[in-house]
Image: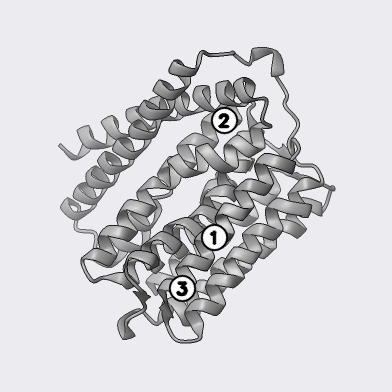
Amino acid sequence: MSILYIVLGLTFLILGGNWLLKAAVGLSLQLSIPKIVIGMTVVSFATSAPELIVSINSALDGATGLAIGNVIGSNIANLGLVLGVTVILGSIEVQRSFYITDWPVMMIASVMLYFFITKDALIERYEGIIMFASLIAFLIYLLRFQKPAVVDEMPEDDELLPLYKIVLFLSIGGLGLWGGSELLIRGAVSLATSLGVSDAIIGVTIVSVGTSVPELAASIIAVLKKEKAISLGNLIGSNVFNILAVLGITSMILPVEVKPDGMSLITNDIYWMLGISFLILPLVFLPRGLRLNWRDGIVLLGIYVTFVYLSFN
């Protein structure tokens, strides 16, 4: 059954990623909105749904620390694992709006989380409202002012879809990514347990990566289909959504507290998240300006593997 879950999970992820990509391109053409904006909004929201579901359920169950751990771990995985693998498969060229708007907003959201959570190990309701209001302001800015941030290599392949098809592909694509990630996690955990792998290793590897699987699937498919604007926008946008929407909404429902047994989130993990978020900017400029290539991917992947290894040890 474990192998079947894994195979079905991967199948749903591939199909879901394809459908979501079709919907994103169609919506970009239909509304004449740059693809980077669609990637940072619609696609990011769809791929961040697992984090939102996990965090709200954790908060309602009283395990609010899991909500913060889920977001911090997912943000590290998005940049270290997902972006690392994505740029190893194909280089991404970016333009000035990346460092003028997108990266700064991701850093502002990350620093905001740092100050809210480290001062008292608690995200209050009013802080959640501030975070969510910041997200709304960012989305309004994107829709009004953002310009294309990544070169579209194959615009002639874009397909104009009727609105009902966009909604259909968006819905089944999002469900496919969510269902596929659930099946893949369940199968992988079951297989690892049957092979005698400890709970600690399973938690640090499979479960922490699990909620980033939709981003990974959507990004890899976008790069393979030369829709790199959607790929990069999805990852930057997902990190912004994870902090401002997932933790913002969760803490508005119930204040999010880090319990004493989870203090490593404040003393260690959040610094990894801030560090890898900051690192993206110099990687974009060095050694050749405004691009990420396979060398950067190896650096990011190496950092993620180091984080997982040190977390376990």
Under mark 1, the amino acid is Ala
Quickly name the residue at label 1.
133
Vertical arrangement, residue 187 with respect to residue 221, above or below = below
Taking 288 as reference, is 234 left or right? Answer: left
Q: Are marks 2 and 1 in contact (CB under 8 Å)?
A: no
Sequence-wise, the earlier of marks 3 and 1 is 3
Q: For the residue marked with disc 2, what is the amino acid?
A: Ala
Specify few, some or many for label 2: CA neighbours under 10 Å numbering under 14, 14-19, or 20 or more: many
Q: Which residue is mark 3?
A: 126
Dots 3, 2 in contact, CB < 8 A: no
Residue 259 seen anywhere in this rendered image of the structure: yes
Can you tell which mark lies on residue 222? Answer: 2
Q: Relative to 209, is 162 on the left or the right?
A: right
* Residue sitting at x 32%, y 52%: 53
Q: Is residue 138 left or right of residue 13?
A: right
Frontmost residue, 231 versus 171: 171
Mark 3 or 2: in front is: 3
Give the image location of residue 259, x and y in percent. 32, 81
Which x, y percent locates residue 184? 29, 41
Say which label, 3 or 2, has the lower sequence index. Answer: 3
State the image quarter where residue 277 is shown: bottom right
